[in-house]
């Protein structure tokens, strides 16, 4: 422990004050960051997988129809699944090769999703796309069509189709580009900001055009000083941009908490950020929008962070085709697949991601990372539902200000409808309530279960 | 394919949860009570030790039997909450009561205060206080016979015997129950729990403030009210029980104030000086009300 001199006390006070002054939201928690394993690792590529499995539903909305047949030869970036329906998003071939199967394949979360399986060619040529020199002259409708056509969805976990998200009826004055990346381990957004700052800024300008925004904030957690510095430098002559450092706190990167941190506004209950004049888009998605609109390049590959509390020979950030089986990636970074008994392999972040049940599960558009977590680093499965001891930890930390203790008890008692009064629908599924519960109670699972039951009931009543 | 069936696919969080378990938290509260307990044993001797041991053992065993957790020591201990209940009860008993009655009280505390109310987390009333209230009703004489640590004679609690000075009452070298007598030691433990975030400051602070104000209004001896009759033990360790006190901050303030006013009212106007026990039990009954009507707003709630 540091010796407490007048100076260290002063320094600590200043640090605490600084923290108070940094923009943030109420409640939430500090998590161990674990970002240093990969934060400085430039994005690399891996050898091409032998096969890719491209799910026909990687988004919120309808599953798309395959538009290729078994036996067809496809090239990377070629559209292979689409649907007229607005609430959907097309998918593209991640590699050049031959379509071998079109059938349900394990998604990783216990379900099977119709997928196009492509056997990769021996030689992969680098796909070429003709940049759209005239993108600035495209009108709003055309830009939205291009964004949909290129399969752009939210890449930070939600998979919400971007062409719906930014298709707003009224002018939205503020765009927030979300570079918070608040979940432990993940650094793919960080790398995008550092390596593709121009694409992030370009994408932001495109969204701003579509929604009519006159100001764009780029919110970045304080633990990424290089990204803050670079983007500040690059936007120096763009008065409509401001780069905003935000406090390192989970879940700073949830859209409503970031919105709160940066603008001080809170969308009304049941509302969206657009209700308070803001659209929040994640940096990777923003860069993908730039790729789609300016470079004419569809979303057929993405950067994933491969990390975890496990001896991985080469943790890092890798650009991989969408549909790459997790097995392929883990093999190539040196993970011993035979030794994964009792491990979790997580697609996404440690707080909101999915622990996959098979390594055949593919990388999807919204997969931010792949984490290998040994038994000692994860919590053992809940054996039973322990009683709540009313310690109020979950209440104190819930970023949305809910009462997870009461909600979980209502769901446990089989009366989730009573939890509507407690705004169960507002839960952002941040998993904090389970994380802080000393009674080792699956609070988040219960809240999510309640949400799912209510949603299902509403769907049936419609 | 073999390794795949062994992947763990449970839901998030995929991190080790914060390593504070209920057992750890209960243990910390017991550690905080250790100085006062040891002082009680030093003051009143082996008699006190026997009472403490009997109450703790009876509480732990009763709960383990009721929940059929009997295969080994740690199973028996469970989440540690029964042991804490036993200890709190013992500390509020006169040392002369003997291990038999103490054990009987502990059984009542766990049975009526906890198990029959639905188990840990579902009980409306603080189990230790339920046990104490039952004992007060059944053995009123034994519960109020206190022995003086100075000369060994039996007296009533200092609240009704005005023979002790404020300083003696504060330091605890006066007749009283095993753990309630030494205010400084109880407060040291309380500060430790506050620092560890195990108790909420609002409840004890407003409990004490309300006691001072109400006692002053009654023109009563404030220091006796404050340092005697187990008020400190109750304010710091019993009223702050998570399960039976409000979750909302404003609720905690009202709860503390209610306990303080209730204590003095019962002591000054009631038939016998058991203000603390009944005041807290009454406020326990109000807790669901506080929790229901004093909710903070969710994000975006108008
Ligand atoms: S209730 Fe929902 S939003 Fe609140 S802490 Fe739990 S998971 Fe997070
Ligand atoms: S954290 Fe767990 S024990 Fe504490 S109030 Fe919430 S659900 Fe209850």
Image: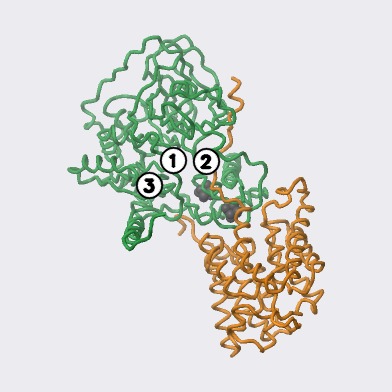
- Per the rendering, the colour in which chain A appears is green
**Image height check: is A88 above or below B220?**
above
| Subunit ID for the residue under disc 3 | A
> Observer-nearest residue: B43 or B174?
B43
Decide if residue A426 is in sight here.
no
The answer for how far apart the CA atoms under marks 2 and 3 are is 33 Å
- Mark 1 highlights which residue? A184
Residue B193 location in percent, x, y? 55, 63
> Which quadrant of the figure contains the N terminus of chain A?
bottom left
- CA neighbours of label 2 inside 10 A, class few (<14), some (14 to 19), many (20+): many
Q: Which chain is orange?
A: B
Do callouts 1 and 3 point to residues on the same chain? yes
Residue at image mark 3: A274
Q: Is residue A342 left or right of residue A75?
A: right
- Residue situated in front as seen by the camera: A413 or A391: A391
**Element on which disc 2 rests:** loop
Q: Nearer the viewer, mark 1 or mark 3?
A: 1
Disc 2 within 8 angstroms of ligand 1 (CB):
no
* Chain of residue at mark 1: A
Report the residue at 69% width, 78% height from top.
B176
Disc 1 crowd rating (10 Å Cα; few below 14, some 14-19, many 20+) is: some
For the residues labelled 2 and 3, say whether their Cβ atoms are less than 8 Å apart.
no
Quarter of image, res A112 = top right
């Amino acid at each position: 422990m540091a010796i407490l001199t007048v100076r260290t006390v002063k320094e600590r006070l200043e640090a605490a004050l600084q923290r108070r002054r940094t923009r943030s939201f109420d409640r939430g928690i500090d998590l161990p960051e674990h970002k240093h394993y990969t934060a400085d690792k430039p994005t690399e590529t891996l050898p091409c997988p032998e096969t890719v499995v491209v799910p026909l539903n990687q988004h919120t909305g309808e599953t798309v129809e395959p538009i290729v047949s078994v036996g067809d030869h496809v090239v990377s970036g070629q559209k292979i699944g689409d649907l007229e329906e607005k609430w959907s998003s097309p998918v593209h071939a991640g590699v050049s090769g031959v379509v071998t199967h079109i059938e349900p394949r394990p998604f990783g979360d216990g379900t099977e999703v119709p997928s196009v399986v492509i056997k990769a060619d021996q030689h992969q040529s680098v796909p070429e796309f003709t940049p759209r020199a005239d993108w600035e002259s495209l009108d709003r409708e055309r830009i939205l069509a291009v964004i949909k056509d290129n399969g752009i969805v939210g890449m930070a976990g939600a998979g919400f189709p971007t062409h719906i998200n930014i298709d707003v009826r009224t002018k939205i004055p503020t765009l927030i580009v979300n570079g918070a990346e608040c979940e432990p381990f993940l650094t793919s957004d960080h790398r995008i900001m550092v390596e593709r700052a121009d694409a992030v800024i370009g994408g932001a300008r495109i969204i701003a055009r579509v929604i009519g925004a006159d100001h764009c904030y780029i919110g970045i957690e304080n633990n990424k000083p290089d990204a803050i510095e670079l983007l500040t430098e690059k936007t120096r002559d763009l008065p409509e941009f401001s780069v905003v450092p935000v406090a390192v706190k989970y879940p700073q990167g949830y859209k409503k908490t970031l919105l709160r941190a940066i603008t001080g506004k809170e969308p009304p209950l049941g509302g969206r950020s657009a209700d308070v004049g803001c659209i929040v888009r994640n940096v990777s998605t923003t860069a993908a929008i730039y790729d789609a609109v300016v470079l004419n390049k569809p979303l057929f590959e993405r950067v994933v962070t491969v990390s975890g509390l496990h001896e991985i020979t080469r943790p890092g950030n890798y650009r991989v085709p969408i549909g790459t089986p997790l097995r392929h990636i883990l093999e190539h970074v040196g993970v011993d697949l035979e030794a994964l008994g009792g491990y979790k392999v997580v697609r996404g972040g440690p707080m909101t991601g999915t622990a996959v049940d098979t390594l055949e599960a593919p990388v999807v558009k919204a997969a931010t990372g792949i984490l290998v977590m040994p038994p000692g680093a994860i919590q053992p499965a809940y054996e039973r539902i322990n009683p709540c001891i009313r310690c109020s930890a979950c209440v104190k930390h819930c970023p949305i200000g809910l009462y997870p203790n009461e909600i979980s008890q209502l769901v446990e008692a089989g009366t989730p409808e009573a939890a509507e009064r407690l705004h169960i629908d507002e839960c952002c599924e941040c998993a904090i309530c389970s994380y802080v519960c000393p009674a080792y109670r699956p609070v988040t699972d219960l809240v999510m279960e309640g949400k799912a039951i209510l949603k299902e009931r509403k769907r049936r009543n419609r | 394919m073999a390794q795949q069936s062994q992947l763990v696919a449970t839901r998030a969080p995929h991190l080790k949860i914060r390593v504070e378990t209920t057992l750890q938290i209960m243990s910390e509260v017991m550690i905080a009570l250790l100085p006062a307990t040891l002082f009680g044993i030093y003051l009143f001797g082996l008699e006190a030790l026997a009472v403490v041991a009997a109450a703790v053992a009876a509480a732990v065993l009763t709960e383990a039997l009721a929940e059929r957790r009997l295969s080994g020591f740690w199973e028996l201990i469970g989440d540690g909450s029964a042991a804490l209940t036993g200890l709190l009860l013992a500390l509020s008993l006169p040392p002369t009561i003997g291990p038999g009655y103490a054990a009987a009280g502990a059984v009542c505390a766990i049975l009526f205060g906890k198990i029959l109310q639905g188990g840990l987390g579902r009980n409306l009333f603080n189990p230790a206080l339920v046990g104490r209230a039952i004992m007060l009703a059944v053995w009123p004489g034994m519960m109020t016979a206190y022995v003086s640590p100075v000369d060994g004679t039996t007296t009533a609690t200092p609240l009704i015997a005005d023979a002790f000075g404020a300083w003696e009452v504060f330091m605890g070298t006066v007749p009283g129950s095993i753990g309630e007598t030494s205010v400084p030691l109880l407060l040291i433990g309380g500060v430790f729990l506050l620092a560890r975030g195990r108790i909420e400051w609002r409840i004890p602070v407003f409990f004490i403030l309300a006691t001072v104000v109400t006692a002053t209004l009654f023109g009563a001896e404030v220091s006796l009210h404050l340092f005697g009759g187990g008020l400190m033990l109750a304010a710091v360790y019993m009223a702050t029980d998570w399960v039976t006190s409000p979750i909302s901050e404003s609720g905690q303030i009202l709860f503390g104030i209610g306990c303080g006013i209730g204590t003095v009212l019962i002591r000054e106007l009631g038939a016998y000086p058991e203000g603390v026990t009944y005041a807290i039990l009454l406020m326990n009954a109000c807790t669901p009300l506080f929790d229901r009507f004093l909710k903070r707003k969710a994000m975006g709630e108008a």
